[in-house]
Amino acid sequence: MSRIAILKTYKIYIGGKFPRTESGRFYQPKFDNKALANMCLSSRKDFRNAVVAARKAQGGWAHKSAYNRSQILYRIAEVLEGRKAQFVAELALQGSTEALAKEEVNLSIDRLIYYAGWCDKYIQMYSTVNPVSGSYFNFSVPEPTGIVAAFAPEKSGLLGLVTQICSIIAGGNTCVILASESKPLCAITFAEVLATSDVPGGVINILTGNRAELLTHFGSHMDVNAVLYCGADKNDIKTLQELAVESMKRTRIREDGDYFDAKHENPYYIFDFQETKTTWHPIEQIAGAGSGY
Amino acid sequence: MKQINFFDTPKIDQVGIDDRISRITARSIKKEAKVKGLYMILNMIDLTTLEGADTEDKVKHICYKAMHLHDEYPDLPTTAAVCVYPNFVKTAVTELKGSGVKVASVATAFPSGQADTQTKLADVKEAVDNGADEVDMVISRGKYHSGDYDFVFNEIATIKAAIGKARLKVILETGELGNLDNIRRASDIAMYAGADFIKTSTGKIKPAATLPVILVMMEAVRDYYYNTGRMVGIKPAGGISNAKLALQYLLLLKETLGGKWLNNTYFRFGASSLANDVLMQIVKQKTGNYQSKDYFSKD
């Protein structure tokens, strides 16, 4: 008699834990008319809980030394490297060829390492000393925006998700990200990687579910500081931008695609979620009259 | 009135209490009932600041906050009281004049209660002379644990006699009493000695207020009411910082003591950050959007 395989239930990732959705609902992503798994159909309350977790983690993550953040991103890459096979298998289940699946996993690891390298460098890149006509030393530095609520690309289950996450957290932000609805398996397996790789609970929170259902809540939550939308639906984008006005959320739009292209290794992805702080520091002499500081 | 032997107070069934609490926490309150509950909670808060670093200005801030919880919604109630150290009572009385917000003062060598009765009386006198409407005293836990219940009883009765018209809240400091049997016994001692309120904690010791502790205290209040006909109030304090938990306290209160206790004459929350969470929930109910602390005053 043949054995009946069990269908894994993938739970969501909030505050370093794996709860079921508060709503108790689920859906089954399919490929070739075959159900792949049971996924949580997250509700607005799950999103709310994730934002609370992200807020709790925000201060600690932003105040870690840049070097330490870099180490932690690198650690994610290390742990991911050790679990490649599972990701390749899941990508294949969701319709990828084996060769493409392998390349996607390798690129995901490389991308983590790429952004790990930027953690202690982007501040120098985006800081400036500003000429002012007064006896002040005037300088600007980037600071994390805060909590970023993100819609991961629909077409790219792993690499697209990883690219968004690492570019957001490299800059000291925390995030709540909604995985691809049709290709969600790798997102939650990636959460299992995160849970075992020194990332403090709450820095990254991953939900699965329906984009349309959660769209307005991502846009209207007053405690979310920025929204990232990967996609091209004009109505979605308009809705998000309108809602974002109320709490002056930073809104960024990125493409939906496979994210294989090297253009996604880009320090401006980090700068997307930075605020610029300018400081006026009194000094002895007027600028230009020799060294006053 | 039946004579009470404090060595023989009812024993508490811990498993039964936990079971009852788990049924309360599984329930959820929605929509209009929730909003009504939230308004009620605001009106039951003793907005508290009891830090070594308190200043006159800090006290003025919380007095203002007590009267103006969130001016965008003019229909909001004020808090029930402001709770401060005795030396700030005068400031609070001046600030709150005419607002209906009461001034409560901790006293009797708060929070440890380790002082002789004369010192405690002087402490209480300062609070009352400066115009405190309510006095929050701590019991002598050391004497309690030595089994000297007479001392604890007499001390409460002495303080009660000394404060005149002011209402007396007796802090049991349940976190230092050890188990539910002790909490029941201390509640009985406090009530028979004349307490107008029994209060869980100073807020300086963990665990502070919890649902099981409050349930035991409510049952003590209920039994005392059946015995004597006098209604005693209850004040959980410390550790209640979100609206959901506060609503569960109200559920427990309604079920155990009934509607007569559902007002700020008989029920209070001692809290500093609860008010903002409740306000955030109210605004969420009205606007539909989840709120951020950034849009509410800190003190």
Image (cartoon, helix red, strand yellow):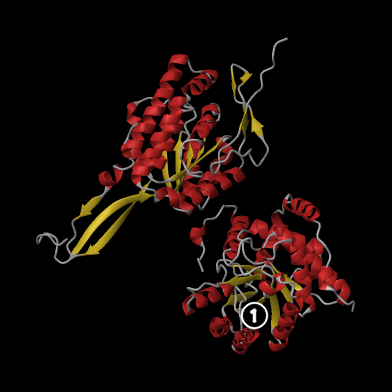
Q: Residue at x 70, y 55 (%)?
A: B31
Q: Residue at x 76, y 75 (%)?
A: B149
Pick whichever, B108 or B50, lies toward us: B108
Residue A246 image point, x, y percent: 48, 53
| Total tally of numbered discs in the picture | 1
Identity of the residue furthest to the right in this view: B2
Task: Tell which subunit mark 1 falls on.
Answer: B
Residue B10 image point, x, y percent: 84, 65
Q: Label 1 sits on what residue type?
A: Gly
Q: Is A129 left, or right, of B49 in this rendering?
A: left
Quarter containing the N terminus of chain A: top right
Q: Which quadrant of the figure has residue B140?
A: bottom right
Residue B231 image point, x, y percent: 80, 75
Pick whichever, B151 or A220, lies toward us: B151
Element type at marker 1? loop
Q: Which quadrant of the figure has residue B113?
A: bottom right
Q: Residue at x 41, y 20 (%)?
A: A103
Quarter containing the C terminus of chain A: bottom left
Q: Which residue is mark 1?
A: B100
Q: Residues within 10 Å of mark 1 (few under 14, many from 20)?
A: few
Q: Is residue A272 in view from this perspective?
A: no
Pick whichever, B223 or A264, lies toward us: B223
Q: Residue at x 47, y 15 (%)?
A: A98
Q: Is A82 left, or right, of B132 in this rendering?
A: left
